Image (cartoon, grey):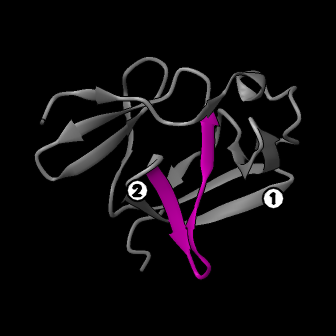
Amino acid sequence: MAGDLILIPTDAAVAGGNGPVVCNGALLSGQLVAHPEWHLAVAGGDGPQLVFWPNGYSGLIADDGIELLDADGGVVARTGDHIEAGGGMTMIDGRDGFGVCPVGIEVVPGAP
């Protein structure tokens, strides 16, 4: 229902960039999409990628999709936006995914 907060996979170790993820060691690039299990994922050429967002991030159901919120409740991106973020591959609770660094998530205007 619009206005409801939803949990998304996060990584407390990435909050300060000192965890297992090497900030800006790799680039995640693709479209922010809704996902039935993770609620938010990033889809690129290989399909949806599990993303571990920085600690404190959440999702908000909106009338036109899902908004990605930062730890302060600010809107970072919306489903359908093309985003780029630094981070790197990590494993949390036995699941492989891309750990996003807390700074530098960008919406790329006009990207496919």
Quarter of the image where one finds residue 28? bottom right
Indicate the quadrant containing the C terminus: top left, top right, bottom left or bottom right. bottom left
**Left or right, 19 with reference to 10:** right
Crowding at dot 2, Cα within 10 Å, few <14 / some 14-19 / many 20+, comes out as some
Camera-nearest residue between 55 and 95: 95
100 is within the stretch colored magenta: no
Q: Main secondary structure of the magenta part?
A: strand
Indicate the quadrant containing the N terminus: top left, top right, bottom left or bottom right. top left
49 is within the stretch colored magenta: yes
Residue drawn where x is 44% and y is 17% of the image: 72
Residue drawn where x is 37% and y is 61% of the image: 81
Depicted 62 relative to depicted 32: above or below: above
Camera-nearest residue between 67 and 94: 94
Crowding at dot 1, Cα within 10 Å, few <14 / some 14-19 / many 20+, comes out as some
Residue that numbered label 2 is attached to: 35
Element on which disc 1 rests = strand
Tag 1: amino acid: Ala
Q: Position of residue 22 (x, y in %)?
A: 88, 42
Residue that numbered label 1 is attached to: 26
Tag 2: amino acid: His
State the mark number for residue 10: none
**Left or right, 102 with reference to 2:** right
Residue drawn where x is 47% and y is 28% of the image: 70
**Left or right, 66 with reference to 9:** left
Camera-nearest residue between 2 and 95: 95
Residue drawn where x is 39% and y is 60% of the image: 33
- In magenta, the rendered stretch is 40-53
